[in-house]
Image (spheres, grey):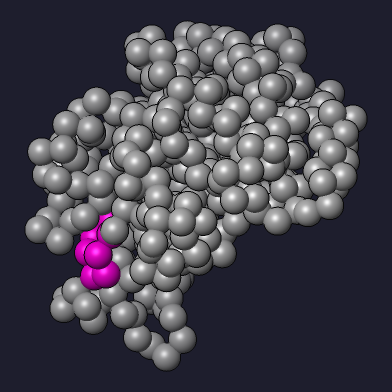
Amino acid sequence: MAEPKIPQRYGLEELLSIGAAFKRNKLWYAPPTDAEGFVNQAVAQLKTYLNVPYVATTSSGTASIHTALGGGLIPAGSEVILPPITDAGTVFPIIFQNAVPVFADVEADTCMLSAETVEPVITDATSAVIVVHLTGCPARMEPLRELCKARKLVLIEDAAQALGARYPDGRFVGTNSDIGCFSTNDQKHITSGEGGFVVVHDEELYYRCHNFADKYYDRHKRGVKLHGVGQNYRMSDVDGAFLLAQLPKLEAIAARRRRLGLLLNERLDTLEGVITQKVPEGAAPSFFFYLFRLEEALTAKVAAVRDALKTAGFTSTAGGYGEKPLYKFKVFQEKSFFPGGVWPAELVAGRKYDYAGLQLPKAELYQNTAVSFQLHQGYREADIERIYETVRAALSSGG
Ligand SMILES: *Cc1c(COP(=O)(O)O)cnc(C)c1O
C-alpha cells in the first residue's frame, strides 16, 4: 500500500481570488492604506486570526528571518543563537546580515532549543535567539522568554512549520516573542506559492520590519525614506490573493494533522525505546511532518525501522530533519560563506569562530536515532495504525 497522497490543496477559490486581483489592473504591493489591496486584505485576516497588532508580509520564510534580524537591529559582528537542526533559511539570513550564527544544542526529547540549552552559549556578544518550532511542535517558550528578557536579547520565533499550532495558553505559536517568522511556501500548511510574513507587537519594530522588507521606501510616509537599507522582500497581490483564499482552510488542515499526529504519538508512546517529540502539556502542535527517535541503546535498530516503513509504502521516510546538523555541512566547516575567503562578521567581531570543532551531543544523537516521514491531511486513522504496527514489528524482530 502506498503512502497517502496529499489532497488537492487549491483550486477554484484561489483562481477566483487571483482573478479579482487581476481585475484591479495592478499587482503592485499596495500601500498599507489601500484596504482593497489583496496583500492588505490577507494582512487584516492574519491579524484577526492570530490576534496580533502588526503583520508585515515578505516573499519567503527566509526573507521573514532576514526581516526580523534587520528590523530587530541585530548589530554586525554580534552572535545569534539558533538550533542546528532546522531549514537553511533560519541560518543564512544571519550570515547575510553580518552576524555570527551560534548553534546551541537541542533537547533530546524535542529536538528544539530550551532555556537550558541556550543559556550556556550566551556571551557578551549575543544579540538574539531564534527558536524553531520544529515540525510545528510548540517549543517551551516561557523560560526562553524570561531568559531573553533578563539578558536583553531579541527573541525571534521561526514558526515556518507551525502555522495553526498553539501554546498551552491557547495563543498561536509565533506570537509570544519579539518577532514571529512565517513561510507560505508550497510545502507549508497553507501557501501563496512562495511568501511569508512576520508578526510583531511593537509599532516601531513593525515599521522597521516593513521598511526593511521594502527597500526602506517608507510606504507609511513617516519621513524615514532610505533612513536604512532594506531588501525587496515584497509580496505581490497575486500572492496576496492566493494567501487570502488559503487562510480559511488553515484551521481544518491544522486540526486534522493534529488529530493524526497526536494519535500516532499516543500509539508510539506505548513502545519501549521510542521517544516521540514531547509536546508541552496543553499545547496544540500542527505537524508539518512527523518526527520521532529511538533511545540510544537502540541505535542499531534505526535503519531497520526506517527500511520497514519504506517497505510498508511510506516512501517519504528519512532520518533526522535535514540529514545532519547544519554545522556539519561543508559551508560551515570551511566558513566559505563569501567569495574571496573573507567572512565580514568575523572581522567585525574581532575573533575567530570554529564550526569544524563543534560537537553538540544531543543534536547529533537526535539525528543518528531519528525517523521522520510526511504526515498530512490525506492520512487516515488506518495509516496511523499501519505506521505504528510497522514500527512495532521492526523493533520486536530479532537482531
Ligand atoms: C520552510 C522553512 C523556512 C524557510 O521558508 P522559505 O519560505 O522556504 O524561505 C525557514 N525555517 C523553517 C523551519 C522552515 O521550515
Q: Position of residue 18 (x, y in %)?
A: 83, 41
Give the quarter of the image for residue 98: bottom left
Q: Nearer the viewer, residue 202 or 120?
A: 202
Q: Is residue 367 left or right of residue 343?
A: right
Q: Nearer the viewer, residue 169 or 200?
A: 200
Give the quarter of the image for residue 276: top left
**Residue 95 vertical position relative to residue 153 in the rendered view, above or below:** below
Q: Position of residue 382 (x, y in %)?
A: 74, 10
In this orientation, does residue 299 appear? no
Q: Nearer the viewer, residue 262 or 382?
A: 262
Q: Residue furthest bottom?
A: 340
Q: Position of residue 126 (x, y in %)?
A: 18, 56
In magenta stretch: residue 376: no
In magenta stretch: residue 77: yes
Q: Which residue is located at x 39 percent, y 45 percent?
A: 206
Q: Nearer the viewer, residue 111 or 284?
A: 284
Q: Position of residue 372 (x, y in %)?
A: 57, 34
Q: Which residues are magenta?
A: 74-80
